Amino acid sequence: MVRYKSKGIFDTFFDNRTSLIIQYDNGDISKKEFLESNFDFVQEMNIKPFSKIDSYEKGMYNYQYYNVLAKYYNMLAKDIRRTAKHKKYYNYYRNIGNNYYHEKDKATLHLLRYLKFKNVEAYFIKMESKFLEDKLYEIVLLDYKEAIFHSKSPWLLRILKEEGVFLEEKKKSLIDDYINERY
């Protein structure tokens, strides 16, 4: 915790996030290693999500916090399903992951409301996965670097459409290689 006090929570968090993105983009780590490193870092930071979103940084932290946990537990569930061992844990981890995905979507909405939906663009993305095709959409905060969110939530999609930020066109994801890579 000492290093966070000297550098600052958000600087430490965003520097680590950017470093992992660069390592992934350069092929130095796999998607699974990227997810595991993000999970380990969030656990090490030991900083829970913020209850009040009054800055971009807090909103982004909350989104990333829940997204990291959701993906990690989803990855554990997939690993269990592949091995066909301890099937009861598959549902257990899957439910935990789904709960974190729901929290992530709520965090996304809180951040978008804080930003008043300004300079936000959302659209369905082209997917290699037939399961995710026409379900997964991308939300981009145009004023911020690396501020790209994803969701399948129907209720969040409805709000994006009501706010007039959802485009009725399908686009290639800004992080297409990452989105379409299996782990």
Image (spheres, rainbow, N blue to C red):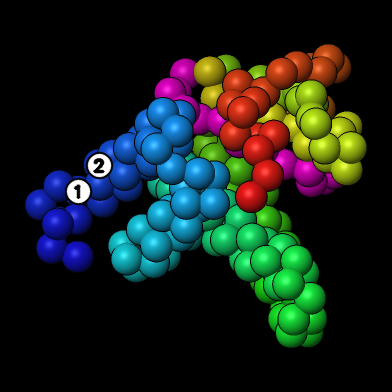
Query: Is 23 on the left-hand or right-hand side of 53?
Result: left
- Using residue 132 as the reference point, say whether residue 46 is left or right of it: left
Q: Please tell me whether mark 2 sits on a helix, a strand or a loop.
A: helix
Above or below, comparing residue 88 to residue 114 in the picture: below
Q: Nearer the viewer, residue 164 or 90?
A: 90
| Labels 2 & 1 near each other (Cβ < 8 A) | yes
| Residue underneath mark 2 | 11
Residue 130 relative to residue 102: left or right: right
Measured in 3D between alpha carbons, the distance from the residue under mark 2 to the one under mark 1, in whole angstroms, is 5 Å
Residue tagged 1: 8
Residue located at (75% from left, 32% from top)? 137
Name the kind of residue labelled 1 in the image.
Answer: Gly
Farthest residue in the front direction? 83
Is 9 located above or below residue 18 in the figure? below
Q: Nearer the viewer, residue 108 or 99?
A: 99
Q: Which mark is residue 156?
A: none
Residue 110: percent from left, percent from top: 58, 45
Give the SS element for disc 1: loop
Amino acid on which disc 2 is placed: Asp
Residue at screen point 74% across, 81% down: 85
Residue 40 seen in the current view: yes
The quadrant in which residue 98 appears is bottom right
Which region is colored magenta? 143-156
Q: Is residue 148 magenta?
A: yes
Picture quarter with the N terminus: bottom left
* Mark 2 surroundings: few (<14), some (14-19) or many (≥20) residues within 10 A: few
- Residue 49 magenta: no
